[in-house]
Amino acid sequence: MDHPTERSPRPRDRKAQLAGLAAELFRARGFHGVGINDIAAAAGITGPALYRHFADKQAVLSYVVLSGIDDMEAATTETLADGLPVPAQVNALLGTLAAQAVERREVAALWRWEGRHLPREERREIRRRSGAVLEAWSKALRALRPELTADDAELLCWAGLSVFGSVSVHHTSVAKKRFAQILVQLAESVLHVTLPEPEETPEETPSMALGEPSRREQILAAATELFGQRGFRSVSMEEIGAAAGIAGPSVYRHFPSKAALMVAIGHRAADRLALAAERALRTDDERDALRRLAASYVHTLLRTPELLVSFSGSPMELPERDKADLIRVQRDYVARWIALTSEVHPELSLREVKITVHAALTIANDLARTRRVNGRPNIEAELTALTHAVLKVSS
């Protein structure tokens, strides 16, 4: 007698499993680089089967992002409980957040930068809930460090959040327990930073350009601004042309495609970083060189809109050849940080150095794009101090 074919049991929470697979794809390729069929294929099911759980790709992203917010809210509520000494509360919170980041690293920063693809109401809900979490963290930090103003505490908490979010921008890993320990140590280093006092510095004199910028420069400037505001995928060549004061088709006389524009933006940013790095590294002291390299990055980042665009994830939406080219340029630059940090901190393994470097870079990248803090009058000195703290080269 034939027995019916046995079916493998379905996971208890199939929806969460599918969302986890989707989150990893979103992290690797960007929201627009992933289709419903890609998610279904990763799960070993068909597209129609996926629709039984999610109405569309936006619904998948929404589930992922909101689950990340849920985790942060739960960690905050559970650890910042009344009755515990403040240091114990903060330590418990950092430990829980670090464990969550390591366990679900594909979600760690997804809500920050891919959430823009969600409907307006959901974006507003994310801002409200994440703002409430940051407010609770800031309150706890001020209880630990009463000398901080509310705004300063908020800045340090954003930096701490970026430490945990940094795990999503690289693939380096160590044993989970050690990984969480490193993240806690890095977060503690920024939460205990003494922010520099504003200094009286002369205003920079803008360079005087002779004549009008070339048409090519105008197009690059317009594309940089639009990509920064709305993302690579959401901007058309016609809109770039209009912003530059020319007809859309005329853009093609200077750039054959939107991808070519993005590549030009990326290489311009890389050239400026390389030049700044060369100047910073004109010293024989390795520790001083690392301090100067970090400061040069922050200085260039805050004055180079192309850099914010090229490091924002837009390259992930380019054709493979163009994407590989820009990623190579970025990795070459980061490799300089890694090599120098290894020299300054021989006690760290190469993997631990990479985790540390990416945390420092992520703090600068995140906070330079975070409206809540990037308008602070002393932001350059503050970001420099934060990166120095992570790299353990504070003066």
Image (cartoon, grey):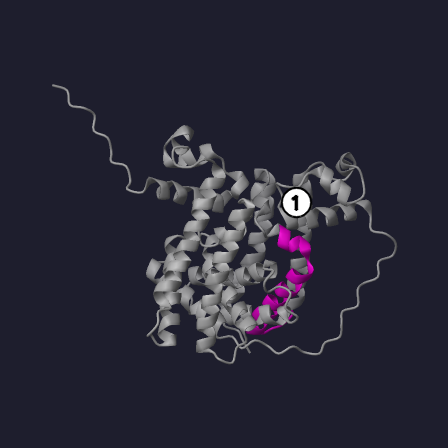
Q: Nearer the viewer, residue 245 or 258?
A: 245
The amino acid sitting under disc 1 is Val
- State which quadrant residue 182 falls in: bottom left
Report x, y in % for residue 147. 51, 80
- The magenta span reads 281-309
Above or below, 109 relative to 357: above
Asked whether the viewer can see residue 391, the reply is no
**Residue at image point 44% right, 50% down:** 66
Judge whether residue 21 is colored magenta. Answer: no
Quick one: which residue is furthest to the top in this view? Answer: 1
Report x, y in % for residue 372. 59, 63
Instruction: From the image, tell me which residue sits under label 1.
Output: 263
**Residue at image point 75% right, 75% down:** 202
Report x, y in % for residue 136. 45, 67
Judge whether residue 296 is colored magenta. Answer: yes
The mark tally for this picture is 1
Locate the N terminus by quadrant: top left
On the picture, is 220 further left or further right than 188?
A: right
